[in-house]
Image (tube, grey):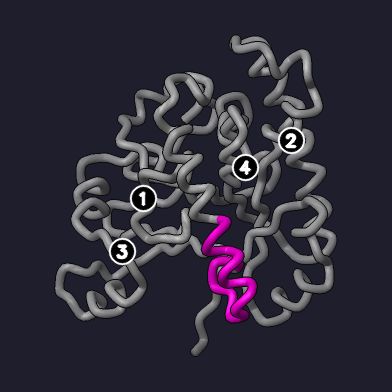
């Protein structure tokens, strides 16, 4: 079909497999870094993890940026990596994108972070987070934020207007107008004049398991997680206020 995509890899046991990364890259696909460094660093810094002030957030961000660069080098030893995308880490109080309040990923050779750098004014964004296409209510972080760019005035790296981090009226109108419950609905609506010419998809491979056991395990496990995430979203200050 000639369709290529970007495969984002976490650098943790069970997700990082050099052979698989090499094989995917050899097929012409792009390799990216699925980062969660702020979450990982916070778990190692027990004393800091209990604090919630700007000074300690900046310290954590520095440690996380060092981790970010080290993990990039691990991936770049296998294939070129010029894009990075946040891993949601729904059980963490830390959103890894908070790193970019204090640092700029371009200084690590990253040219695009999709949540920051892709305007959704004429792009429909669909994600299978929560094992559903309309899972905003059960998504802690993988969603579109209706915010003015002024919210990020103190950040070193600022999102572009209309991006998922700073969606404007145009981006919100497009992405609120088209909502789908299942894949069949998406396929049917592809021919609609209301469907935009450009589409950005976030897909988690384990959700598309063709084996019966894996499919059922994902179905049951994700439904349980969705209940937990729904209640977590309702807890005030579950994530630190500075976080996106």
Q: Quadrant of residue 165?
A: top left
Image quadrant where residue 167 sits? top left
The residue wearing badge 2 is 40
Tell me which label, 4 or 2, sits earlier in the chain: 2
Q: CA distance from mark 4 to mark 2?
A: 21 Å
Q: Earlier in the sequence, mark 4 or mark 3?
A: 4
Indicate which label's residue lies in the foreground, 2 or 3.
3
User: Label 3 belongs to which residue?
Assistant: 181
Tell me if residue 231 comes above or below residue 200 in the rendering: above
**Earlier residue among tags 1 and 3:** 1
Relative depth, front residue between 140 and 87: 140
Q: Position of residue 24 (x, y in %)?
A: 70, 75
- The earlier-in-sequence mark between 2 and 3 is 2
Q: Is residue 116 visible?
A: no
Q: Is residue 61 left or right of residue 212?
A: right
Dot 2: element: helix
Q: Which residue is mark 1?
A: 119
Q: Nearer the viewer, mark 4 or mark 2?
A: 2
Query: Which residue is depicted at the point 75% across and 69% down?
Result: 21
How many neighbours does mark 2 have within 10 angstroms: few (below 14), some (14-19), or many (20 or more)? some
- Residue extending farthest to the left is 193
- Mark in front: 1 vs 3: 3
Tell which tag, 4 or 3, sits nearer the viewer: 3
Residue range in magenta is: 206-221
């Amino acid at each position: 079909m000639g369709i290529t995509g970007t495969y984002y890899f976490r650098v943790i046991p069970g997700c990082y497999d050099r052979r698989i990364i090499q094989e995917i890259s050899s097929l012409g696909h792009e390799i990216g870094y699925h980062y969660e460094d702020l979450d990982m660093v916070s778990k190692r810094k027990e004393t800091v993890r209990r604090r919630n002030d700007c000074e300690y957030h900046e310290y954590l961000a520095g440690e996380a940026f060092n981790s970010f660069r080290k993990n990039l080098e691990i991936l770049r030893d296998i294939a070129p990596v010029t894009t990075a995308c946040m891993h949601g880490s729904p059980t963490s109080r830390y959103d890894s994108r908070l790193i970019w309040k204090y640092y700029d990923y371009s200084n690590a050779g990253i040219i695009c972070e999709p949540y920051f750098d892709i305007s959704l004014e004429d792009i429909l964004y669909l994600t299978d987070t929560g094992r559903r296409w309309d899972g905003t209510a059960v998504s802690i972080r993988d969603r579109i934020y209706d915010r003015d760019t002024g919210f990020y005035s103190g950040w070193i790296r600022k999102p572009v207007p209309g991006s998922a981090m700073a969606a404007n009226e145009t981006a919100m109108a497009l992405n609120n107008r088209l909502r789908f419950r299942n894949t069949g609905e998406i396929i049917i609506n592809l021919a609609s004049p209301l469907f935009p010419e450009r589409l950005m998809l976030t897909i988690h491979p384990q959700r598309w398991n063709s084996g019966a056991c894996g499919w059922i395990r994902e179905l049951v496990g994700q439904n349980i997680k969705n209940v937990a995430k729904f209640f977590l979203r309702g807890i005030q200050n579950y994530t630190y206020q500075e976080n996106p």
